[in-house]
């Protein structure tokens, strides 16, 4: 009898834990453009700093926008400001930020990708661990911008 009671309580506990588990409910449609530097997409808890550098307004500079790279979690798009053939600024108008986890990942990963782009002056940059999907989309969009510039 004692075994049956323990088995029953264990089964009930497992079922309660399974039904209480919360998963992400966002999908690819959850990306919004980053214009003002504040993430205000669904699930974003508070405004945060922009993962982009401010484009320069120097004479002779041009701003070129790359193709939108569709990823599993949403679109990624890169925009470069180029002056005298050199990348002077990078912004990311579109990136996945439809839930809190996406926002956390990209708040960390995008500044790293942007910094590496300015340093490397090419699409030959490392992916960010933990942000593989965003990194892949970023590199694809970045390469499309560089193809337009050359």
Image: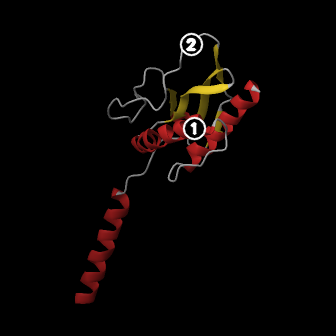
State the residue position of label 1: 119
Most distant residue in the front direction: 84
| Mark toward the start of the polypeptide (2 vs 1) | 2
Q: Is residue 1 visible?
A: no
Total marks in image: 2
Question: Vertical placement of 83 versus 46: above or below?
Answer: above
Position of residue 10 in the picture relative to residue 127 (left or right): left
Marks 2 and 1 sit apart, C-alpha to C-alpha, by: 19 Å
Picture residue at 38% right of the left edge, 30% below the top? 49
Q: Which part of the image, by quadrant, shows the C terminus?
A: top right
Question: Vertical placement of 86 versus 122: above or below?
Answer: above
Q: Which quadrant holds residue 18?
A: bottom left
Picture residue at 69% right of the left edge, 29% below the top? 145
Dot label at residue 58? 2
Q: How is the image coloured?
A: secondary structure
Q: Which quadrant holds residue 63?
A: top right
Question: Vertical placement of 137 versus 6: above or below?
Answer: above
Question: Vertical placement of 70 versus 18: above or below?
Answer: above
Picture residue at 53% right of the left edge, 17% below the top? 56
Of residues 26 and 39, the one drawn nearer to the viewer in this rendering? 39
Q: Residues within 10 Å of mark 1 (few under 14, many from 20)?
A: few
Q: Secondary structure at mark 2?
A: loop
Residue 51 percent across, percent down from the top left: 46, 32
Q: Which part of the image, by quadrant, shows the N terminus?
A: bottom left
Verify CB contact (< 8 Å) between mark 2 and mark 1: no
Most distant residue in the left direction: 2
């Amino acid at each position: 009898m004692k075994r049956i009671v323990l088995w029953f309580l264990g089964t009930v506990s497992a079922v309660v834990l399974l039904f209480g588990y919360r998963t992400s409910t966002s999908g690819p449609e959850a990306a919004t453009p980053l214009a003002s530097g504040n993430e205000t997409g669904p699930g974003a808890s508070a405004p945060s700093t922009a993962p982009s550098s401010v484009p320069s307004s120097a004479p002779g500079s041009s701003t070129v926008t790359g193709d939108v790279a569709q990823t599993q979690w949403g679109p990624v798009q890169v925009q470069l400001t180029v002056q005298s053939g050199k990348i002077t600024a990078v912004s990311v108008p579109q990136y996945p930020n439809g839930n809190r986890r996406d926002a956390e990942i990209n708040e960390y990963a995008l500044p790293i990708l942007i910094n590496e782009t300015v340093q490397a002056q090419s699409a030959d940059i490392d992916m960010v661990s933990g942000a593989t999907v965003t990194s892949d989309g970023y590199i694809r969009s970045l390469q499309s911008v560089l193809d337009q510039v050359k």
